Amino acid sequence: MKMNRLFAIAIATLFSATATSAQSATGSDQVCRIGMQYQISYNEHWGANRPVIITVEPGSAADVAGLKPGDVIEKVDGKATASLDEVDFQKLLISGNTTRLEVSDLSGTKQITLGRDCQSRYILSERQLARSFSFYSLQDASDRRIVRPYKVKTSTKADFTNLRTYSFAASSPDNEEIDIAVYKEVGKYLSAMGMKETLNNPDVIVDCYYLFDNNKLFTSFNSSAPHNSWQYSPRDKRMISIPIMPAGTQEINAPYVIQLGVRLINARNNLQIFWQCESNDFLSTPLELAEYARYNVPLMMMEFPFIRYRENPTFRLRSQRYFYTGLYYQANDLSLVAAVDPDSPAAKAGLKAGDRIISINGIPALSGSEEYSSAYKEFIKKSMKYRTEEDIFTDANGLAGCRYWSPKNYEKIARMMAQPKYKPAFAYLFFFRSYVNDQQITSCVFQVQRDGMPESILVQPVLRDESSVTLE
């Protein structure tokens, strides 16, 4: 890892977050976000010529409104989106305090009122600060990409618009365990997309096929190449090392092959396959097909009904977990409470806008970002030796050599986190981690100054997990 580049990116994140107060306020002092991304569909199977939602940020206004990836925006403020150009659509989408949408999914159409998440451009939320101090816990504040060897095929005339119900193909006793694993994940996904399971005249039959076998072309391992790879586990919501051989492995160096396919078949014409997704991998050691399905089917299904990739889809894995108290900090004075969410843990504990924070968990709070940045840079440098050598990845911003903390060093990391010279006041955002807080104390003590007098306030934060997996 090039240390200077790492520092530049890590510190730039902090400075960009805290420098907003120096910018010229040519427009509103409020910054509002909806929390979703869309793409105009040119896909004949789903949402043709209309905006299709491709990402929704957990906890955002779009999430609260009930929007999800795959939803087709049919109307915005009563106007059909198919007749609008994208510029006009965007104007209607973001104008006003709310927007009326008509959206469709695999259950039909529904009316939605989309609000806004607004805050002053001169204050920082705990979500923003968790990203700014991400190297305290990359496990909880990082984005990474993975590419999976999936291939998607569809019937040329397939229209998914009116598909409403599904059923599963019958299983034989020999295959029941694998089928159950696949069908469970497919059913969970289709139900979330609005479809209903039925045995009575369904629109779709869900079928699957699979293969695990010795590779007849195998000669020997490549001794200079890894035999395992780090893959995302939807069940564990983290990356784990499994015997899937890395992309680019030559077939002669792989002792086993594994294949899994999911098909959505026209229940009224079983010769027509509406949609099919297939995964193929090389394995270094045997892996149960049912286990392989648990890793892959949730990701494979994300290509239905809106197909983004015909092969080799790229997924963005966003880790975003932090302790939420409801505090907002003044961007140009990080020791000043700028706002407090109503009914939040901080509000219930008695913290108020205008409170001057003296310390957090005994660590002095500072006003400016420069001191934090200098200490943060030093912390990153001195703690690098405590990071793992096993899972080294390039984050979604292109920074190579990122590494999580090594479990064997958790106690040493926790001792570093407690040293005032590193100015780790905002480490409280990751206080749920033993390498940040080895005392297993879940509360935070804010010492504030009011009317010239110090006062200690105990806050019981709430762990927020806003992690997500999306197609890039």
Image: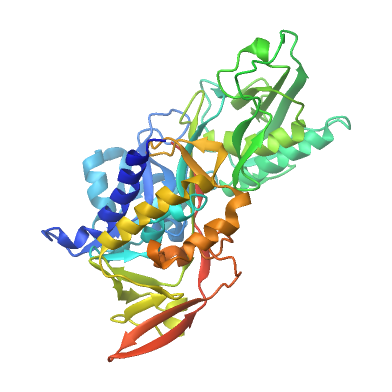
Please report the residue visible at 76 percent of the width from the left and 35 percent of the height from the top: 290
Looking at the image, which is closer to me, 32 or 42? 32
Give the quadrant of residue 165: top right
Please report the residue visible at 38 percent of the width from the left and 64 percent of the height from the top: 421
Q: In which quarter of the image is the C terminus?
A: top left
Residue 435 percent coordinates (x, y): 56, 59
Please report the residue visible at 43 percent of the width from the left and 86 percent of the height from the top: 456
Give the quadrant of residue 171: top right
Q: How many marks?
A: 0
Residue 91 percent coordinates (x, y): 22, 49
Is residue 470 visible in the rendered image? The answer is: no
> Residue at the right extreme?
173
Is residue 319 visible in the rendered image? The answer is: yes
Residue 188 percent coordinates (x, y): 65, 46
Q: In this view, does 216 lie above or below 229?
A: above
Q: In this view, does 36 lie above or below 159?
A: below
Q: In this view, does 300 lie to the left or right of 56?
A: right
Residue 385 percent coordinates (x, y): 50, 45
Q: Is residue 200 left or right of residue 59?
A: right
